[in-house]
Amino acid sequence: AGKSTLLSVISRLLSQDGGVVLVDEKNVTEYKSKVLAQRLSILKQSNHVRLKLTVRELVSFGRFPYSQEKLNKEDILMVDRAIDFLNLKDIENSYIDELSGGQKQRAYMAMVVAQDTEYILLDEPFSGLDPLVRESIVKSLLTFIDFEKQTVIIATHEIDEIEAILDEVIAIYNGDIIGAENVETIREEQGYS
């Protein structure tokens, strides 16, 4: 349906071939990269780091749009906050390549949280996770959203994943955008049980 492509166009990882994408009433093409990275962050569906990094080092990458490579006190506080939100304190010095799939996903999500943007784009953030890990990450995400009041856009093909998380849903079906008040409306319109 183009969900991942849409998020990539919004975040300017892909060029748009038509239409206009506005962030705060400004076309994303008019933003300088650093400024856009301070407004919105994205967690892609598949993330692979080929460097030997600890969880803390990975989460610190979220501060790059602000500090480049030199973290200041505010950056360190934001990294600590993200690690706490995603319950990673006990493994913050562990290497990413030694973590389970759920731990890695929490670490990547913490990196996005540390970026401290008004808009967070998540592409299939729960795919491939077992139900208990998914529930833990969803709880952390809900706590973060409630506390920070940020806008989170999630692309997923699993309606059950988003039912407890999102306030508003826009469904893409056969290339058409279908607006809905809630998940139940989509279920009824598309014949889901």
Image (tube, helix red, strand yellow):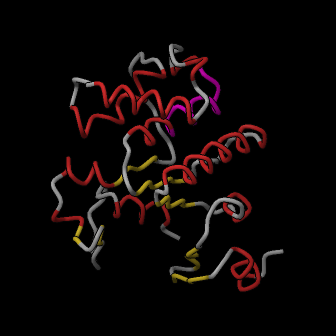
Query: Magenta region: which residues?
Result: 99-109
The structure residue drawn at horizontal position 69% and vertical position 79%, both measured from the top left corner, is: 186
The structure residue drawn at horizontal position 27% and vertical position 76%, both measured from the top left corner, is: 20
Q: Nearer the viewer, residue 102 or 118?
A: 118
What x and y, as percent, mark residue 118? 38, 56
What x and y, as percent, mark residue 189? 71, 86
Q: Nearer the viewer, residue 4 or 28?
A: 28
In the picture, measured across the screen, residue 91 lies left or right of residue 47, that is: right
Quarter that holds the C terminus = bottom right
Quadrant housing residue 183: bottom right
In the picture, measured across the screen, residue 98 lies left or right of residue 23, that is: right
64 is higher (above) or lower (below) than 134:
above
- As drawn, the residue found furthest toward the right would be 193
Magenta-colored segment: predominant secondary structure: helix
The structure residue drawn at horizontal position 71% and vertical position 64%, both measured from the top left corner, is: 163
In the picture, measured across the screen, residue 185 lies left or right of residue 178, that is: right
- Is residue 103 rendered magenta in the image? yes
Counting every numbered tag in the picture gives: 0
Quadrant housing residue 26: bottom left
28 is higher (above) or lower (below) than 54:
below
- Is residue 187 rendered magenta in the image? no
What x and y, as percent, mark residue 129? 69, 41
The structure residue drawn at horizontal position 75% and vertical position 40%, both measured from the top left corner, is: 130
